Amino acid sequence: MSRRWPLLAVLVLTALLASWGAWLLRIQPPVEDTAGPPRSDYTLDDYHLVVMNKEGSESFSSDGPYLARDPYSETLSMNQPRFGFPAHDGKGNWTAGSDSGWVSAKGDEVRLKNSVVLDGPVVPKTDRTHLRTEQMTVHPQVQTAHSDLFVTVTRGASILRGTGMNANLKTNRLELLSKVSLHNATVHSQ
């Protein structure tokens, strides 16, 4: 029996060394370069931003309490932004606001999210158009707006509701795509 113990000890030691060697040679998962979301390359508090188009005229302006720029995609994220989109005729602005906003790197797409408000320009002797929804995309360079969600449009005593919307801000034309209803409360004075 005394000859078996050293042989058994060598076998156990060999098994332990082989297991440890196999554990060291296991395939390692790749190490990520970053932990968590990327940091902004800059942020602004109480900002005012004017974005120009290719011709050098104002495409839109924005102000708000907070703006952050993503260094990789070069997009802007905003908290409680307010926007001004110049009207086609140069008289007044379409104004917009929401809880959060996003602007593409080229400034050709603006996304508004949560409690979205878009108001038409002030035109004398004409009722102003007001749009309300939860999400909207505006393309300032071609002056269009789009939403897939429920939209309420008010103008004077008229209330138009529907799901999905296409708007041409140049011509002040709106198209609601489905489930459209109209309420026109004409006020008569005596």
Image (spheres, helix red, strand yellow):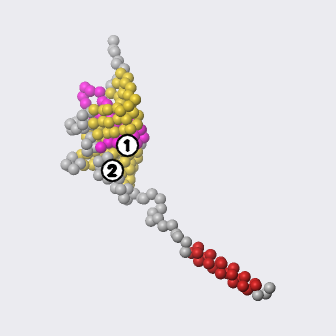
Counting from the top left corner in percent of width and height, residue 43 is at 38, 55
Mark yes or no: residue 94 visible. Answer: yes
Q: Inspect the magenta stretch and tell me whether residue 126 lies in it.
A: yes
For the point 24% across and 49% down, which residue is it?
A: 52
- Cα distance in 3D space between marks 1 and 2: 12 Å
Mark 1, residue position: 112
Crowding at label 1, few (<14), some or many (≥20) Cα neighbours within 10 Å? many
Q: Position of residue 36 (x, y in %)?
A: 47, 59
Identify residue type, mark 2.
Ser
Instruction: Specify whether 32 is left or right of 72.
Output: right
Q: Is residue 174 above or below residue 29?
A: above
Q: Quadrant of the N terminus?
A: bottom right
Residue drawn at x 38%, y 38% is: 148
Q: Earlier in the sequence, mark 1 or mark 2?
A: 2
- Residue stretch in magenta: 112-139
Query: Image height check: is 12 above or below 174?
Result: below
Crowding at mark 2 (Cα within 10 Å: few <14, some 14-19, many 20+): some
- Where residue 171 sits: x, y (%)? 24, 34
Dot 2 falls on a residue whose secondary structure is loop
Query: Of all residues shown, which one is farthest toward the top?
Result: 190
Residue 115 in magenta stretch: yes
Q: Main secondary structure of the magenta part?
A: strand
In the picture provided, is 188 more to the left or to the right than 10? left
| Contact, mark 1 vs mark 2 (Cβ under 8 Å) | no
